[in-house]
Image (spheres, rainbow, N blue to C red):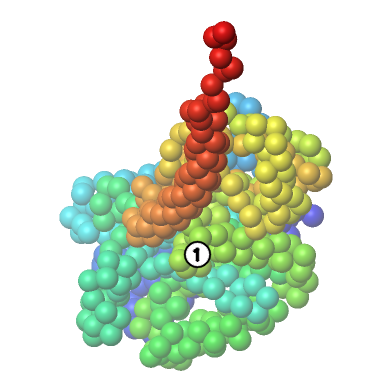
Amino acid sequence: MSITEALSFAALTDVGKKREHNEDNFLVDRKLALFIVCDGMGGHAAGEVASAMAVRTVHEEIKREKELLNDYVANKTGVDRVNKRDITNMLEFAVNRASSKIHAEATQDASKRGMGTTLVAVIFLGTQAFVVHVGDSRMYMMRGGVLEQITEDHNVYNELLKRKKMTRAQVEKLAPKNAITRAVGVYEHCEPDTLVLDAAVGDRFLLCSDGLSEYFEPPLGQLEELVVLLNETDADKTTKSLIDTANERGGKDNITALLVTVGNVSARDEKVVQRLQLKRDMLARMPLFRPLNDREIRRVLQVTEVHAYKNDDLVITEGEKGDELFIVLSGQVMVSRSGAHVAVLKPGEHFGEMSLIRTQPRSATVVSSGEAELMVIRRTEFFEILRKEHQLAVKLLWQFTGVLADRLAETTADLGDARDELAAEDLTVDIFAEEEGDRMTAKLPAPPSTDR
């Protein structure tokens, strides 16, 4: 049974205790394995219109790309090959299509002017979950009793922290700190964030509006309380408990909870989970990615592929140009230069990182020694991260300067050693030259006289 066939869900929405209209909307398409939550804004029920339009438009656009989705799941090769970026681009287009339609509607009807909506959506393809979001509606992931917030709110609070304009304590004092900085429909185009996650049996995903999430963080609540509720095996009971808790604590906004479970929450596949953790750990240990936080590591994993090699398979060839970084996930590879053995690389070790920033001939040939799996990051996908994630780009480029500095120090040290060796060789030549010179310039005894 595939991940998508093993999905189950429970969803509930409530107007709350303070609002007259429920401007939240959600959608579940079991065939597509698509789940969406939107939280509209705009007043006079315009928010309800915006959220409904967003849900409907995104759903229609994704359904239109059914062939693309099928090709990705089928893992087609050649001209029909569909990669992760094709899927995330499609999701971004769908959300921007919704933004354009909502903005056009608001422009034509003065009573709806300024309307917009947040959006968080996930679609499961094969063993992966593709996430797209705008605003402060959230997605959490529960894995093995550990809860993780997958999305990052697009609000003033996070924006100021990322730009390091103010300290956390200063930002906490701001009245509009939770004002959102991105929304669908307020402008013709918006800027969605996309993420790709590996899903495993036992994982649980919660999509919710901020009318729920705000009651499970200080000062209104604690995240640990959300962990307790999500550990409940009955999904319908869980969603009801989530809504009830939010209402008991004020219910000042509309509340929506959409809970998606992969298989049985108590039937985790430990091997799969360990493998997913291994991939993350491999990246986190590399000097290039060491300073990245969990969200940023996930962003890099999003553009990472795993390639399998059999014994003696050629990975890269000396002298050929390359654009990929390789990290050994399992097995080992042999490195040779000019036909001479150089090294054996084992899990956690890597090669080719300089190819991410410049095109140059490979300095060595790498061949698999037995069966091996390598994580691969291509330059085009790496540059895509640099273009879209400015804060992450600063970290990565700073780390690259460190890697280059280390390489320069090593090269300088090697040159120093080589210079010392050459000096020693030159001294030997000089010694022998002096000895040869002595032999050549020594006065020989005069030949015997021939005079009689």
Which residue occupies the extreme front position in the image?
Answer: 452
Total labels: the figure holds 1
Taking depth in this image into account, of 319 and 413 the one nearest to the observer is 413
Taking depth in this image into account, of 293 and 344 the one nearest to the observer is 344
- Side of 146 where 341 appears, left or right: right
Determine whether 433 is above or below 329 in the image. above
Residue at 45%, 66% in the rendered image: 291
Crowding near pointer 1: few (<14 within 10 Å), some, many (20+)?
A: some
Residue at 75%, 42% in the rendered image: 368
Give the quarter of the figure containing the N terminus: bottom right
In the picture of the structure, the residue carrying the numbered disc 1 is 290
Image location (x, y in percent) of residue 169: 28, 85
Image location (x, y in percent) of residue 151: 46, 65
Quadrant of the rendered image containing residue 261: bottom right
- Side of 383 where 188 appears, left or right: left
Note whether residue 214 is visible: yes
Image location (x, y in percent) of residue 31: 65, 50
Image location (x, y in percent) of residue 66: 59, 39
Note whether residue 378 is visible: no
SS under mark 1? loop
Residue at 76%, 69% in the rendered image: 270
- Side of 319 where 232 appears, left or right: right
Report the amino acid beneath label 1: Arg
Give the quarter of the figure containing the C terminus: top right
Determine whether 199 is above or below 144 in the image. above
Quadrant of the rendered image containing residue 366: top right
Residue at 69%, 47% in the rendered image: 343
